[in-house]
Image (tube, rainbow, N blue to C red):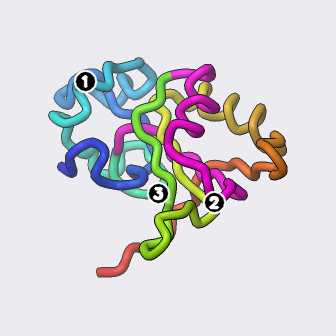
Amino acid sequence: MVPAGSEACWGSGQSPRDPQSSPLSLIARFSPIAIDGMSGLAGVGLSGGAAGAGWCIFVYNLSPEADESVLWQLFGPFGAVTNVKVIRDFTTNKCKGFGFVTMTNYDEAAMAIASLNGYRLGERVLQVSFKTSKQHKA
């Protein structure tokens, strides 16, 4: 298991309260504190791969000055956010214009996307959507 916060986003899917529970528990909410101890659920009702810590949201058209606190402030009111990551240029440390937010609940993530897609942040209009999975390099 990859430690929380070490990747921009985890695979799509909700995780159960207890890694030993049945697939029916996927609809239950869980505590983000338990994320580190959870194991994957070998494709049980999930799209895009193994179970992860929540639903990954792609945020595009951020300003070069944007930082993680901006994403926490934007998405926090919609529900539990477990991780935010602004992608930065290695040499300038400025935002490359996009980032990722991970939320634990699908309905809350969908509401955040519906509310924030097209939202004007400063001089920019944000594009917000669920992250689409791409094939990872071996």
Instruction: Kindly report the distance in space between the C-alpha atoms of the residues bearing marks 1 and 3.
Output: 24 Å
Query: Pointer 1: what residue?
Result: 33
The residue lying at 21 percent from left, 51 percent from top is: 2
The residue under the point 35% across, 44% down is: 52
Q: Earlier in the sequence, mark 2 or mark 1?
A: 1
Give the labeled residue for mark 3: 48
Circles 2 and 1: CB distance less than 8 Å?
no
C-alpha separation, residue under disc 2 versus residue under disc 1: 32 Å
Indicate the secondary structure of the residue bearing disc 2: loop
Please tell me whether residue 71 belongs to the stretch shown in magenta.
yes
The structure residue drawn at horizontal position 15% and vertical position 34%, both measured from the top left corner, is: 37
Where residue 45 appears, as percent x and y from the top left, is 43, 43
- How far is disc 3 from disc 2 in space, using C-alphas? 30 Å
Q: Which residue is mark 2?
A: 64
| Cβ atoms at labels 1 and 3 below 8 Å apart | no
Judge whether residue 56 is colored magenta. yes
Q: Quadrant of residue 40?
A: top left
Q: Tag 1's secondary structure? A: helix
Could you tell which of marks 3 and 2 lies nearer the N-terminus?
Answer: 3
Residue 123 horizontal/vertical position (percent): 84, 50
At label 1, the amino acid type is Ile
Q: Position of residue 58 (x, y in %)?
A: 60, 52
- Closer to the camera: disc 1 or disc 3? 1
Please state if 4 lies on the left or on the right of 61 as rendered: left
Mark 3 burial class by Cα count in 10 Å: few <14, some 14-19, many 20+: some
- 56 and 106: which one is in front? 56
